[in-house]
Image (cartoon, rainbow, N blue to C red):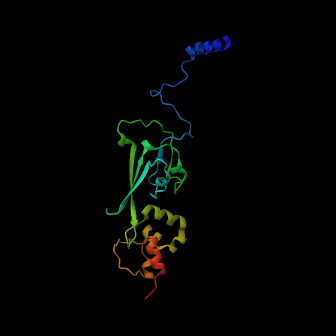
Amino acid sequence: MKYPKLRELGRAIRALWKGPYTIDFPRRPSIPPPSSRGRMKWDDKVCVGCGACARVCPTGAIEIYDDLESDPPARTLVRRYGMCIYCGQCHVLCTTTTGCAHSTEYDMACVDRDRSVEKVDKEIVPCEICGRPVGTREHLRWIYERLGSLSFSNPSLFLAAGHRAAPFRKGEPAGLLRTGRLKILCPVHKREAALADEP
């Protein structure tokens, strides 16, 4: 019984010279290891606004709002760091693989909650017939660049990539012809155009 007490007494005496085991936080910040899961950092130049991160986020810390009435139509990604649990699903399942990643930043205490919210706007490419979103312009351009010459089998890709500034014409008359495939179309109208019979 006396040996554990002597051991504790020895540790207490050594601590008088060595100082405390803990760090002097927040006056002296700790340096976490490089593999730590800190605050997520987004690279908005790489992020294409596809929304994969919002679909896999278990806490709903990432939300997507589409405004089809604005000019041009816009998609807003809202990231709430106060709800993030640092699971890393957004990083693992990111379409571009480098759009977001963990950082070593961990001290995010703030008085104003608005400081822990980020908003990013991306331009939406709508279907030329019904106006439903086909995707963001950056996402369609990213797919176009990855497919290369194969992207010419999908007119929506090379049209959205900037080969033609396609005007948005809502309320196109019914009875879409095959020539209508040379427009930016949603999957529903693309199928309708592919199955249409020429007059």
Can you tell which quarter of the image residue 45 is in?
bottom left
Whole-percent x, y for residue 177 in the image:
43, 82
Q: Nearer the viewer, residue 144 or 49?
A: 49
Q: In this view, does 182 lie above or below 43?
A: below
Q: Position of residue 33 (x, y in %)?
A: 56, 36
Name of the residue lying farthest toward the bottom: 199
Q: Is residue 54 left or right of residue 14?
A: left
Which quadrant is the C terminus positioned in? bottom left
Quadrant occupied by the N terminus: top right
- Residue placed furthest toward the left: 70
Identity of the residue drawn at 39% across and 45% down: 117
Left or right of residue 195: residue 2:
right
Q: Is residue 137 above or below residue 34?
A: below
| Residue 70 point in image, percent of width and height | 31, 62
Q: How many marks?
A: 0
Q: Relative to 181, does residue 112 appear above or below in the rendering?
A: above
Q: In this view, does 95 lie above or below 176?
A: above
x, y percentage for residue 89?
A: 53, 49
Residue at the spot 44% in from the left edge and 26% down from the top edge: 27
